[in-house]
Amino acid sequence: MQNLQPRKGSRTINISNFLNVGEENAQTAKTLCELLKLDKRALTAAIERERRGGKPIIASCDSANPGYYLAGTQEEMRAYCNSLKHRAEEINKTRAACLKTIDSLPKERGLKY
């Protein structure tokens, strides 16, 4: 499991303090990184840490308005949770297919398929 605690000596930033409520107010990762002087990996880790701590941070999948925002209603948060469930199911299907592929690969490099 990934450690989402801030690195020793690093500052803890609450991303949720920089987000607004509603998808129409979503801020892109690029904007947040520039504003907070973070790289994308640090931003993503901070967002995950806050989500696991109970902050209602949503990632918009709307290509016209991508970014992060705070859920304003239970329904918004429920819809986001449903989208995460669907993504997890798709990832698991891909993982299962990859596992099936293992047996078709050579055990060592240089051997033929």
Image: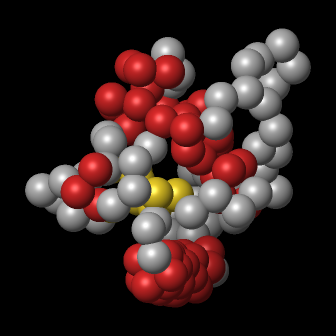
User: Residue 55: where, in percent of width, then height?
Assistant: 64, 58
Q: Position of residue 73 (x, y in %)?
A: 45, 76
Count of numbered circles on the image: 0
Left-right relation of 12 to 66:
right
Q: Position of residue 79 (x, y in %)?
A: 42, 83
Q: Nearer the viewer, residue 100 or 84?
A: 84
Q: Residue at x 44, y 68 (%)?
A: 72
Q: Which quadrant of the structure image shows residue 1?
A: bottom right
Is residue 94 among what the camera can see?
Answer: no
Residue 39 horizontal side relative to residue 35, left or right: right
Q: Is residue 24 above or below residue 98?
A: above
Q: Residue at 43%, 26% (x, y): give it.
A: 33
Nearest the eye: 56 or 4: 56
Q: Quadrant of residue 12?
A: top right
Q: Is the image coloured rainbow, by chain, by secondary structure, or in one colour?
A: secondary structure
Residue that protrudes farthest toward the left in the picture: 64
Does residue 13 appear in this view? yes
Q: Quick check: 4 above or below 95?
A: above
Position of residue 21 measured from the top left corner of the image (x, y, whole percent)? 39, 56
Does residue 4 appear left or right of residue 45 in this picture? Answer: right
User: Which residue sits at x=77%, y=50%?
Assistant: 2
